[in-house]
Amino acid sequence: MKAVHFGAGNIGRGFIGKVLHDNGYEITFADVNDEIIDALNREHKYTVHIAEENGAAYKISGVKGVHTAQDTEQLAEAIAETDIITTAVGVNILPIIAKTIAPHLEQRGGGKPLNIIACENAVLATDTLKAAIASEIGTHAFSNIGFPNSAVDRIVPIQKNENILDVKVESFYEWVIEADSWAGDDKLDGVNYVPDLMPYIERKLFTVNTGHAAIAYYGKTLGYRSVSEAMKDDEVVVFLRNVLKETTLYLTHNYDFTEVEQSEYIDKIIGRFENPYLSDDLDRVGRGVLRKLGPNDRIIKPLVYLHENGHDHDALSELVVHALKFDNQDDPEQMEMNQIVSEKGVSHFLSTHSGLEKGLLEEIKAKI
Ligand SMILES: NC(=O)c1ccc[n+]([C@@H]2O[C@H](COP(=O)([O-])OP(=O)(O)OC[C@H]3O[C@@H](n4cnc5c(N)ncnc54)[C@H](O)[C@@H]3O)[C@@H](O)[C@H]2O)c1
Ligand SMILES: O=P(O)(O)OC[C@@H](O)[C@@H](O)[C@H](O)[C@H](O)CO
């Protein structure tokens, strides 16, 4: 069995690559990073280290690399033969990946089933990828291709290791895939197939990722650099719990999770954030501030729902204020947001970018 995975970064090598390898796939990693591609083609293997006391180390072999823009023939060949295509590149890059994949899908023809799965932190990211591919080539090449949406959860920080391919990850992982959109019978072990993905992706996004954003945006204002460092401050933990209390309202109102289930889920996640064997930079966790303040993302979507339905949303409003003040000079999205805010003001930014209405805007502005 063969796989093509776009994005040989942290989650690509540290999570998706490992699951595919454990299922017996030979993996072609497609990326734009020459250093990583060269290392993959030199070593054909790497190691995944589990970040815990006496953590295990797993050898991942049978891997190679192709450059998505330069190795067109090798990529065409890999896609022609592949059983699965996965991505972990960042949701904003999906339109670029769609342009890369589309012509090769046309050439591939019908044949054996193929599944294409976007593994990004966004609601229904595979649908986004599918629509972008369709706008390139239409849908005639889609017979026998499954486009299941998915939710992926494993914390993999940015890291520098002696071998650039090796990657340190937390022991926890969860990969949930929409069962009904899967093409063929060869399902993956180690993955949870569900009939309806929405409860899982929103629970993950509005707990793990909203929680992470709360730690990053508030923790940075208090001068912390990493998640585990910020988690030692009770003020951060209290703020985090207040934020997650509010997203719990959203999740228990919209889905079948009980408050007890959600509270257990939160406790487990807080334990993951406290992991002393992982050093996860607040700048990584908060990066992409424009995306994170988008109307369907981890902060604004639950906030707007709670406001519209007359529920507590003070902590999420405060989180917007911290996000507006986040200071990460390396994040181009931060620079863009700062420029819009300085030229046109906060109200303009939050109404045009985040889609906030006057009432909520006034509440947030009163907290700045
Ligand atoms: N790191 C985590 O804890 C984590 C967990 C779950 C989900 N995710 C999601 O996974 C995705 C990737 O995150 P990451 O942490 O691995 O980021 P990363 O920066 O480590 O990896 C992204 C990779 O994509 C590559 N890339 C960029 N443009 C490309 C292109 N046009 N073609 C091919 N490759 C390209 C980059 O070179 C890089 O190697 C994001 O959507 C993120 O939200 C991350
Ligand atoms: O990847 P982002 O930028 O959407 O979010 C940052 C982190 O919250 C995220 O990468 C988590 O580590 C991950 O989603 C855990 O599964």
Image: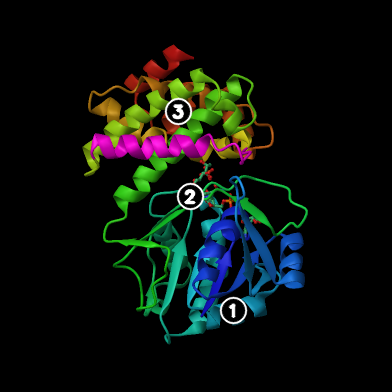
Q: Earlier in the sequence, mark 3 or mark 1?
A: 1
Q: Which residue is mark 1?
A: 78
Give the magenta-colored segment's residue range: 258-280
Report the Cα–Cα distance between label 3 and label 1. 43 Å
Q: Residue at x 55, y 30 (%)?
A: 216
Residue pushed farthest bottom?
111
| Within-10-Å neighbours for mark 3: few <14, some 14–19, many 20+ | many
For residue 210, side relative to residue 96 (left or right): left
Residue holding disc 2: 172
The verdict on label 2 being within 8 Å of ligand 2 is no
State which tag comes first along the sequence, 2 or 1.
1
Q: Any magenta on residue 275?
A: yes
Q: Main secondary structure of the magenta part?
A: helix
As rendered, which of 338 and 112 lies closer to the eye? 112
Q: Secondary structure at mark 1?
A: helix
Please name the amino acid that badge 1 sits on.
Ala
**Residue 223: percent from left, percent from top:** 64, 21
Give amino acid for label 2. Answer: Phe
Q: Label 3: which residue? A: 350
Q: Can residue 259 be seen here?
A: yes
Mark 3–mark 1 contact, CB under 8 Å?
no
Residue 273 lies, in percent from the top left, at 51, 36
Three-letter amino acid code at disc 3? Leu
